[in-house]
Amino acid sequence: MRCAGADRPVVALIPGNAGGAKGAGRPGPSGGQPSLRRDEPVGRPKPKEKPFVISKWVVKDAYEKVKANAGAAGVDGESLAAFEADLPRNLYKLWNRLSSGTYFPPPVRAVEIPKKTGGTRTLGVPTVAA
């Protein structure tokens, strides 16, 4: 390519293929990363922290309390034994959803408990699934 009034070829100083046949930003002979051009939009950086600071230990302690209480299966029918089949993954999923603000608890199972004085009271049994 020759520039008007130049007696020698003009060389692009941007590393890589600077808008050649395959498009802008393709790695050239140098094999490096494509360079950013001023007209290319730059995305927003992602936040490094979760919206809610919840320790993984808090989630694990809560699980151990449920286990010590011999919790019954909730509306989903999943028992503690089934939850424990993949315990590390299930606890991580639960922690991740809690700390990112995307956890929405499933409905609870209603159980009628008899009272000493007669009658019943309703007890809500939550699920153990993440």
Image (cartoon, rainbow, N blue to C red):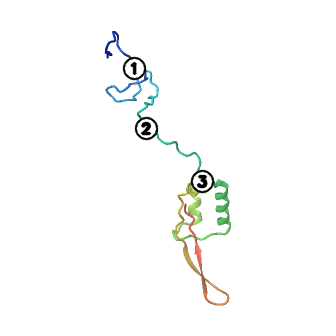
Q: Residue at x 39, y 28 (%)?
A: 26
* Image coordinates for residue 13, horizontal then vertical, percent: 43, 20
Kindly identify which residue carries mark 3: 88
Which one is in front, 50 or 93? 50
Locate residue 2 relative to residue 73 in the image: left or right. left
SS at mark 2?
Answer: loop
Kindly identify which residue carries mark 2: 41
SS at mark 1?
Answer: loop
SS at mark 3?
Answer: helix
Q: Residue at x 34, y 12 (%)?
A: 6
The first of marks 2 and 1 along the sequence is 1
The quarter of the displayed image where residue 15 is located: top left
The first of marks 3 and 1 along the sequence is 1
Disc 2 from disc 1: Cα separation: 21 Å
Q: Nearer the viewer, mark 2 or mark 3?
A: 2
The residue lying furthest to the top in this view is 7
* Image coordinates for residue 121, horizontal then vertical, percent: 61, 83
* Image coordinates for residue 5, horizontal then vertical, percent: 32, 12
Say above or below: 126 vs 46.
below
Disc 3 from disc 1: Cα separation: 53 Å
Q: Amino acid at mark 1?
A: Ala
Say above or below: 24 vs 120.
above
* Image coordinates for residue 124, horizontal then vertical, percent: 58, 75
- Quadrant of the rendering where the N terminus is positioned: top left
Q: Are marks 2 and 1 in contact (CB under 8 Å)?
A: no
Q: Amino acid at mark 3?
A: Pro
Mark on residue 86?
Answer: none
Say above or below: 62 vs 55.
below
The first of marks 2 and 3 along the sequence is 2
Callout 1 environment at 10 Å: few (<14), some (14 to 19), or many (20+)? few
Kindly identify which residue carries mark 1: 12
Disc 2 from disc 3: Cα separation: 40 Å
